[in-house]
Image: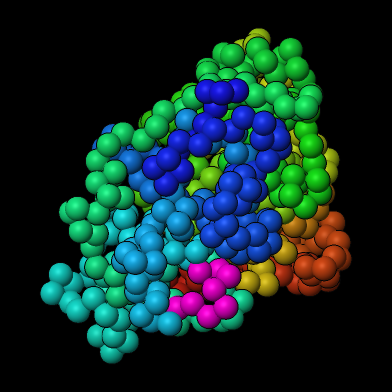
């Protein structure tokens, strides 16, 4: 236990005696670093944001903002983090803090440390490029009309997981858009040129509860074979909520998010294989739009803070009927690779879910990867209906993947649904109503009536059953209007 420690703001801090279920946020505040705040304990407000040193493509380091309230502190053993206190001091403000102060970007101040950390992550993003090298770094609505990027290349999605309850977003945006590039002697900038910390095998037991990070996938599979009740945790964006809100105290937690075997991404001739523990932000970066349906999904999946930790494996592993990735993956015809000490087996995602939060995955299996077959469908779309545009849970999610030939006939169709049944599911009846039919308004209206009746939607605080059915019924019409609009643009080009 004396060897278990985290480097925080350049100082090594031990974890001896810290409860096995403790989050990074609780531990930071208990050690006197109270800049990080608990606003929601669910990863929705970003008041707890901190910077985590993660591996960069070039072998250096990236400063990645994450929600400290969700990360198990023992998952940070051997890692390096920076909190708001580590950015600057009262006498020597960090450029992000200075611009926030100048713009009046802090009102009550509760959310400000989280905004500063998320903003700092974007400030140090190495591929951030100004729209015009000669442009003034100060935001000018008349000179720059991109609603989501500043003239300095700042991506506002970097702040999508940070909530300001005082609604002071305009000055916060102005502060973000006024940032220049880091100076060469900036210590946090210089840190990017050095490798990120490697994963450290960890075994901590406190008061009968145990946290383990195995060194290899082989060790992990043997462990869950011997301990079938172990809880597998990757990004902890779901498990962290269970710990915080529902008081879950698992006797044995096994961290798998740093296993190299689960962090791969390979594009072959006939499929794309994505490791189950590769963070969604990293998947998005590596695919670079290669899968258009996922490119539509990613910006709508929670927030950047969540995507920096969340994984496909975690989203599928929970078996939730309202996860955003299952409908898209169902539409893509995805297969799930399950691994155990006996070997691997491959399961069609459409056969993976069995009942509410139940799947075919055995207790001694983990999700190693997902496989998306190639070639991809020609017409794809992801529709998410939620109360907020970003950082919200779906009321209904619909994903389409259609092939339409030169004769305007639908030759293949896959439609994934979420939020309308006890499990994510394929809209089989609607698919059958489309295949072999002309892609026209008559076909779409007929199929839409069928789609409206798919699933068994229920009423809850997010939406009524009738509303969910209505949204299903309109989704295909929306897709059709989009394709017809695209056709008309091509005809007039």
- Image quadrant for the C terminus? bottom left
Q: Is residue 456 left or right of residue 231?
A: right
Foreground of the two, 401 or 161: 161
| Residue found at the very far left of the displayed protein | 134
Prevailing secondary structure class for the magenta stretch in the rendered image: loop
Q: Residue at x 57, y 13 (%)?
A: 218
Name, please, the residue furthest toward the front.
Answer: 91
From the top left corner, tell me how far across and down residue 6 is, in percent. 50, 36
Is 444 on the left-hand or right-hand side of 79? right
Q: Can the viewer see residue 412 in this picture?
A: no
Q: Is residue 376 magenta?
A: no
State the residue at coordinates (18%, 54%): 184
Point out residue 134 in the picture as x, y percentages from the top left corner.
Answer: 13, 74
Q: Residue at x 61, y 76 (%)?
A: 165
Q: Which residues are magenta?
A: 105-112
Front residue of 44 and 341: 44
Residue 442 placement: quadrant: bottom right
Q: Tell me the colour scheme of the image.
A: rainbow
Location of residue 33 with respect to 10 vertically, above or below: below
Which residue occupies the foreground of this view, 170 or 3?
3
Q: Position of residue 416 (x, y in %)?
A: 65, 51
> Residue drawn at (31%, 50%), measured in percent from left and top?
188
* Image quadrant where one finds the N terminus: top right
């Amino acid at each position: 236990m004396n060897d278990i420690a985290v480097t925080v703001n350049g100082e090594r801090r031990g974890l001896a005696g810290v409860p096995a279920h403790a989050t990074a946020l609780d531990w930071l505040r208990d050690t006197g670093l109270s800049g990080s705040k608990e606003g929601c304990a669910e990863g929705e407000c970003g008041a707890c944001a901190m910077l985590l040193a993660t591996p960069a493509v070039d072998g250096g380091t990236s400063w990645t903002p994450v929600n400290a309230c969700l990360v198990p502190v023992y998952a940070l053993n051997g890692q390096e983090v920076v909190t708001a206190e580590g950015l600057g001091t009262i006498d020597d403000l960090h450029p992000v803090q200075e611009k926030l102060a100048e713009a009046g970007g802090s009102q009550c101040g509760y959310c400000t440390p989280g905004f500063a950390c998320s903003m700092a992550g974007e400030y140090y993003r190495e591929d951030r490029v100004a729209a015009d090298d000669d442009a003034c770094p100060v935001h000018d609505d008349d000179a720059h009309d991109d609603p989501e990027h500043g003239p300095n290349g700042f991506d506002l999605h970097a702040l999508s997981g940070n909530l300001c309850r005082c609604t002071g977003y305009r000055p916060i945006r102005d502060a973000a858009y006024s940032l220049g590039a880091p100076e060469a002697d900036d210590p946090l900038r210089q840190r990017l040129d050095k490798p990120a910390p490697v994963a450290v095998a960890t075994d901590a037991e406190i008061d009968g509860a145990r946290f383990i990070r195995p060194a290899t996938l082989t060790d992990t599979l043997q462990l869950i074979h011997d301990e079938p009740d172990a809880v597998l945790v990757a990004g902890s964006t779901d498990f962290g909520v269970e710990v915080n809100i529902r008081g879950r105290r698992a006797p044995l937690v096994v961290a798998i998010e740093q296993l190299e075997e689960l962090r791969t991404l390979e594009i072959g001739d006939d499929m794309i294989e994505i490791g189950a523990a590769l963070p969604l932000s990293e998947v998005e970066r590596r695919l670079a739009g290669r899968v258009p349906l996922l490119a539509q999904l990613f910006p709508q999946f929670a927030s950047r803070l969540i995507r920096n930790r969340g994984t496909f494996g975690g989203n599928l592993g929970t078996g939730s009927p309202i996860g955003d990735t299952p409908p898209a993956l169902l539409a893509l015809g995805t297969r799930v690779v399950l691994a155990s000490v006996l070997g691997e087996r491959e399961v069609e995602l459409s056969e993976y879910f069995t009942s509410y939060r139940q799947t075919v995955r055995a207790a001694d299996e983990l999700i190693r990867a997902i496989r998306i077959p190639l070639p991809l469908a020609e017409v794809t779309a992801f529709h998410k209906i939620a109360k907020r545009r970003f950082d919200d849970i779906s009321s209904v999610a619909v994903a389409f993947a259609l092939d339409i030939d030169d004769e305007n006939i639908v030759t293949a169709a896959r439609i994934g649904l979420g939020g309308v049944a006890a499990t994510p599911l394929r809209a089989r009846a609607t698919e059958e109503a489309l295949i072999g039919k002309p892609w026209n308004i008559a076909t779409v209206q007929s199929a839409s009536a069928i789609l409206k009746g798919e699933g068994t939607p229920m009423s809850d605080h997010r939406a009524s059953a009738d509303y969910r059915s209505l949204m299903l019924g309109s989704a295909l019409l929306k897709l059709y209007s989009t394709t017809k609009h695209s056709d008309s643009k091509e005809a007039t080009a």
